Structures are given as structure tokens and as C-alpha cells.
Amino acid sequence: MDFSQFNGTEQAHMTKVIEKKQMQDFMRLYSGLVERCFNSCAQDFTSKALTTNESTCVQNCTDKFLKHSERVGARFAEHNAEQMQGK
Amino acid sequence: MSFLFGGGNRSVEGSVDPAKIEMAVAELDMITDVFNRLVNSCHTKCIASTPNNHRYVEGDLLKGESVCIDRCTAKFFEVNKKVGERMSAMGSAAQASGSFGR
């Protein structure tokens, strides 16, 4: 995205828009992750409480997804940078 | 548009061009959407291919998973490019032949 065409007011406006989208994106990430880890890890419905295994599973699931997302983000940024240079 | 600063591409300080903003927002939305799809697709391909029954052994990425993610993102972008090329080819073919050809 090319910000050189934007004046000060427009940049300020875009910053606010981006902030709001980041918030929404974070909420989406959170609820998506809850659903994902629940689907994968919650298997034993003989009790209401999470078993130790399920608990560990959820921790691993969350950590792994966040690390995965980070790595994908790094590759994505690299690719975008290459694209910019190519143009 | 103010007459004080003349024409040209330089936007007037203090005014907001709604069309420009809208385009920038649309572009931002598209990029975000692509990223989210990429994350989900590569997670399914590389980490948990059975989403309802996967056993997460540890919190860090395994070596194989890391390599898979790198390749997965590269392929995703290639597919993105190919699909774009194909669709624009089909678009221009449709334009060239009018509404009769296929």
C-alpha cells in the first residue's frame, strides 16, 4: 500500500481505520482459536472439567497456532517485499 | 478542491478524499483476507489435517511443520498468481469474442 499519496488528515484517518481493523482481527483470531482448539482437544465428555491431557492439548494448540501464524506472517512479508522490488 | 494550491496530485492538507480512502480500505481488506485464508489453509495442510481429532504433542513448531509452512506459503502465492493469470486471460477472451464465444 502506497502512503505517499495521502495527506496528513487522510493518514490520520487511515491510522484509525487500521487500528479498528486490528482490534476486530484480534477478536476474530481469539474466537477462531478457541473453536479450533476445542474441536481438536475436547474429546472426553464424561466430566465437565478439562482433563490434564486436554488442558495440555489446549496449551500446545494455542502456542503452536500462534507460532504458526507468526511464521506465515514472516513468509508473507518476505513475499510482499519481493513483489514490491519486482515492480 | 481548494483553488489556493492549484491542481496536480498533491492532496490538499486537511481534506479527506473519500474515493482514495475507500480504495485503500478495500485493498487492506483484501490483503487481510488473503492472509487469514493462508494461515488457515497452511494450518490444515501442515499441522492439523484432522481438525476434530488432532493430538498436539508440543507447543513449538516441529521441524517438519516449519519446512511445510515455508513451502505451503510459497505454493499458495504461486496458485494465487496462476489463478489471477487464468482469470484475466478468460476475461480478455470473453471481451474479444463478445457474448457469443466461449
Image (spheres, coloured by chain):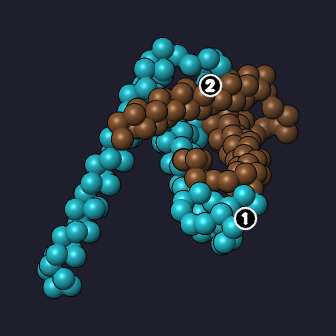
Mark 1 vs mark 2: give the one in front.
1
- Confirm whether residue A8 shows in the render: yes
Which color is chain A depicted in? brown
Left or right of residue B4, residue B34 in this image:
left
Q: Badge 1 is on which residue?
A: B15
Above or below residue B54? Residue B62 is above
* Quarter of the figure that contains the N terminus of chain B: bottom right
Q: What residue is rendered at 65% in x and 41% in y?
A: A36
Say which quarter of the image contains residue B51.
top right
Say which quarter of the image contains residue B98.
bottom left
Which color is chain B depicted in? cyan
**Circle 1: element type:** loop
Above or below residue B73? Residue B64 is above
Chain identifier of the residue bearing label 2 in the image: A
What amino acid does circle 1 point to?
Answer: Ser
Location of residue B77 in the rendering, given as x and y in whole percent from the top left corner: 38, 40
Q: What residue is rendered at 22% in x and 69% in y?
A: B92
**Residue furthest bottom as drawn:** B100
Q: Badge 2 is on which residue?
A: A67
